[in-house]
Amino acid sequence: MQIIQEIESEELSLLNIVKTTLQLSEKQNISIEVYIKKTIGISVNTRNSIVENVEFNSDGTLFITVYNKFSKGCVSSKDFSINGIKNMLEAAINISKYSSSDFFSGLPDINNLCFNAIDLDLFHPWSFNVEHAIKLSILSEQAGFKFDKRIVNSEGSFFNGHITINVFGNSLGMLEKYKSTRYSSYNCMIAKDQHSMQRDFDYSISRKIDNLLKPEILGENSAKYAISRLGSRKIRTMKSPIIFSSSISYMFFSHLIYAIHGDHVYQKSTFLINDLKKKIFPDWLNILENPHLKQGLGSKPFDSEGVSTQIQYIIHNGILETWLLNSYNSRKLNLKSTGNCGGAYNWIVSHSNISFEKLLKDMNQGILVTELMGQGVDIISGNYSRGAVGFWVEQGKISYPVNEITISGNLRSMWYNIIGISNDVDMRNNIQCGSVFLPEIQVSGN
């Protein structure tokens, strides 16, 4: 109860700072938006049951953006005093005077703003008990060591718990706020046999601390994954069917976020520039963006410029339905903002309602990818090339681990030719998706 009262008091203080800033700007002939984000929390890192560090965090920043006709000035500061705010306003106005005029800049359309932020059940505070956080971190590591004698070391365990307060206001009369919590735990174990050493990890993220994976299970999972990679082999260069496991399949769809981002669209720097309202995925595949999902990791009542977020289809029956737009790039494209200033929210990717085991059987022979490395994706051309680690699948069953391979292709054909997505949906990311089966991809090995 005390932590709730403290956070509510802090939220009221931040709200008054935004009000004061807006009031101080009223005598100026400008449009303005004011945003405060404050994060409070702890981070604990342990290794071999020894506490390596404990970090306490209480960090807030005030952002002021002014529009002087069509010229823009932005400043940020951690000084929330009256003099500090006055200095920020003066600096922002001076910057705008020397900025080039841009007809498309300015505050969002008032009809798009959020004047009544909905409660998305994002705030579930915890007492920030350091001893308990340390215990959670150590327990997961101890469970990993107990799991198997081949677990010889640890790369460490982490626990993070944070509260974030967001307050936003502008000269169009909007003044809204929301607060959220986010907890995460992570553990990485090292396995060794006569021939090699391998590492692997597991993690858990939730808005509620009680919904985190139990530390004992987290440690056992890390140990199990690390052991499963012992005896990894190289394979020959070939074309092969592939499955992206659900733990990494969100990465496969995250490239779509960049490809349909409004900035890339108006700059014509995306390979999907001519594909709006066209089919780019199989008929059965849908991607629904739901920023109003209760306790969602990507849920927000409004975006970074105060525009109301909305539930919308990104992909419907395989067809690209929308770009991701903020006020600026929507004006450049003569379209309406989709409330995506700051990125995408909860993407729910439809699946084929089959199990992961059935997906392996359907593939019969190929590669199950469980980890990706590198950033070899070109949004202009759609070319895709990344390092990968995983398992060779034979007769529908995992046969042995493989490493030191590179997978490559083009996102256009990879997306269009998806055969199936299993129902083992991973809920730990903004993109919620099961394992993804592709019929063929170039694999570079020996």
Image: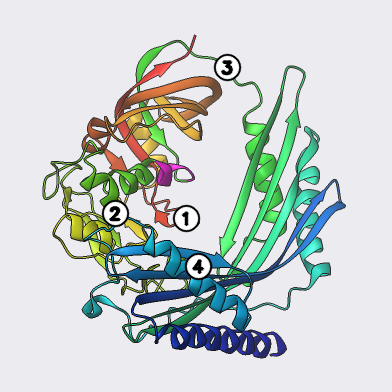
Mark 2, residues whose alpha carbon is within 10 Å: few (<14), some, or many (≥20)? Answer: many
Tag nearer the camera, 1 or 3:
1
Q: Where is residue 419, by image quadrant?
A: top left
| Residue 314 - label | none
Q: Quadrant of residue 168?
A: bottom left
- Image quarter where the N terminus lies is bottom right
Nearer-the-camera pick, 308 or 144: 308
Q: Earlier in the sequence, mark 3 or mark 2?
A: 3
Which amino acid type corresponds to the residue marked 4 in the rendered image? Ala
- Is 384 drawn above or below residue 332 in the view shown? above
- From the image, tell me which residue sits under label 4: 91
Instruction: Please give the label number shown on residue 429.
Output: 1
Say which residue appears at 39% left-offset and 48% top-offset. 434
State which tag comes first along the sequence, 1 or 4: 4
Residue 233, numbered circle: 3
Which region shows up in magenta?
247-251
Q: CA distance from mark 3 to mark 4?
A: 59 Å
Among numbered discs 1 and 3, the one appearing first in the sequence:
3
Residue 209 in the image, given as x and y percentages of width and height: 63, 70
Q: Which mark is residue 350?
A: 2
User: Which amino acid is tagged 1?
Assistant: Asn
Label 4 vs label 2: CA separation?
Answer: 48 Å
Residue 353, image x and y in percent? 31, 52
